[in-house]
């Protein structure tokens, strides 16, 4: 088990380093000069050059990358080019709302996916199965940038139940969480259905039925427990999708999280902040998937022994 964990951690380290390099190079290839954005078109060439030197933007890319890596090793993300504030402060102020939105979206997804997936598996090829899978297809097909405005129009403008945008309380969290959670619920419900149908045809399920166990106990204690193994892997993968989808959702609902900070920094050509935000999201994605692999290996010995 230790060798399996070490191999997963080594793979995660290689991936994270690759992400750091790719993010750094792509950000510096984005058109636009942060100096011109900060000083405006009326600034003189001398002022631009002085600011560029003070920010270290006049150095070769390999030197800028070296200083970036050196800062990461020392847990120093640097300073914002626009606000001059430490990037760690900017991120710490925004990471809370993003985590809150992600957890709420997961809760919404679980509340929708598990009942639908179990119902579709138990009522295979019946009306309930068709309805659950139709909802799943609809949830996957509607993107966040369309689902969000539709929910705002119906629940905020027409009914007036929830705020249109911003973060003002639990009621303002409902629509963004539903926007993110429905897409995840659609994928999870299909996976739960497929996995549960496969488990229900196993011999030990027939044995449990022959012993006279109740249907609820067979499903909850025996079938669903074993059906969750592939679902756990999917959840780990989809958490990264939630973080990526949160960027769009936070813009639609003006949610003050990492996604909105990333877009604002891109518009201002604030390279260090954009790098830090994307790196944090990517690293979280890699870490969550690594932990998922480790948990999967602990639950299924065939994975770690293979």
Image (cartoon, helix red, strand yellow):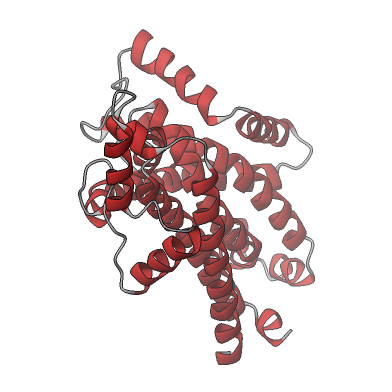
Q: Residue furthest top?
A: 158
Q: Nearer the viewer, residue 133 or 19?
A: 19
Q: Residue at x 55, y 86 (%)?
A: 6
| Res. 122 in view | no
Image x and y of residue 190, in percent: 68, 45
Image x and y of residue 59, in percent: 41, 57
Q: Residue furthest bottom?
A: 2
Would residue 149 appear left or right of 166 to someone viewing this image? right
Would residue 13 appear left or right of 39 to someone viewing this image? right
Q: Residue at x 61, y 85 (%)?
A: 4
Q: Nearer the viewer, residue 152 or 63?
A: 63
Q: Nearer the viewer, residue 248 or 124?
A: 248
Image x and y of residue 23, in percent: 52, 54
Task: Give the quadrant of residue 154.
Answer: top left
Task: Give the quadrant of residue 83.
Answer: top left
Where 250 sits versus 8, above or below?
A: above
Q: Residue at x 48, y 18 (%)?
A: 150
């Amino acid at each position: 088990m230790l060798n399996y964990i070490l191999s997963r951690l080594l793979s995660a380290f290689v991936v994270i380093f690759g992400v750091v390099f790719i993010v750094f190079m792509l950000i510096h290839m984005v058109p636009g000069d942060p100096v011109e954005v900060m000083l405006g078109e009326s600034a003189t060439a001398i002022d631009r050059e002085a600011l560029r030197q003070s920010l270290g933007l006049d150095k070769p890319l390999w030197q800028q990358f070296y200083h970036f890596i050196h800062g990461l090793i020392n847990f120093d993300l640097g300073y914002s080019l626009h606000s001059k504030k430490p990037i760690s402060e900017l991120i710490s102020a925004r990471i809370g709302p993003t985590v809150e939105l992600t957890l709420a979206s997961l809760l919404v997804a679980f509340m929708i996916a598990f009942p639908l997936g179990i119902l579709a598996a138990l009522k295979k090829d019946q009306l309930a199965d068709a309805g659950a899978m139709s909802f799943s297809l609809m949830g996957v097909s509607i993107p966040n940038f369309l689902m969000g405005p539709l929910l705002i129009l119906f629940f905020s403008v027409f009914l007036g139940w929830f705020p249109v945008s911003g973060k003002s309380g639990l009621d303002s969290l409902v629509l963004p969480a539903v926007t993110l959670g429905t897409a995840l619920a659609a994928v999870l419900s299909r996976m739960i259905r497929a996995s549960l149908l496969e488990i229900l045809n196993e011999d030990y399920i027939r044995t449990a039925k022959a012993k006279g166990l109740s249907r609820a106990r067979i499903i909850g204690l025996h079938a669903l427990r074993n059906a969750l193994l592939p679902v756990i892997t999917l959840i780990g993968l989809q958490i990264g999708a939630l973080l990526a989808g949160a960027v769009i959702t936070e813009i639609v609902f003006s949610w003050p999280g990492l996604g909105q900070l990333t877009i604002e920094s891109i518009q201002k050509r604030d390279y260090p902040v954009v790098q830090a935000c994307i790196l944090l999201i990517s690293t979280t994605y890699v870490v969550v998937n690594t932990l998922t692999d480790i948990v999967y290996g602990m639950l299924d010995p065939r994975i770690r022994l293979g």
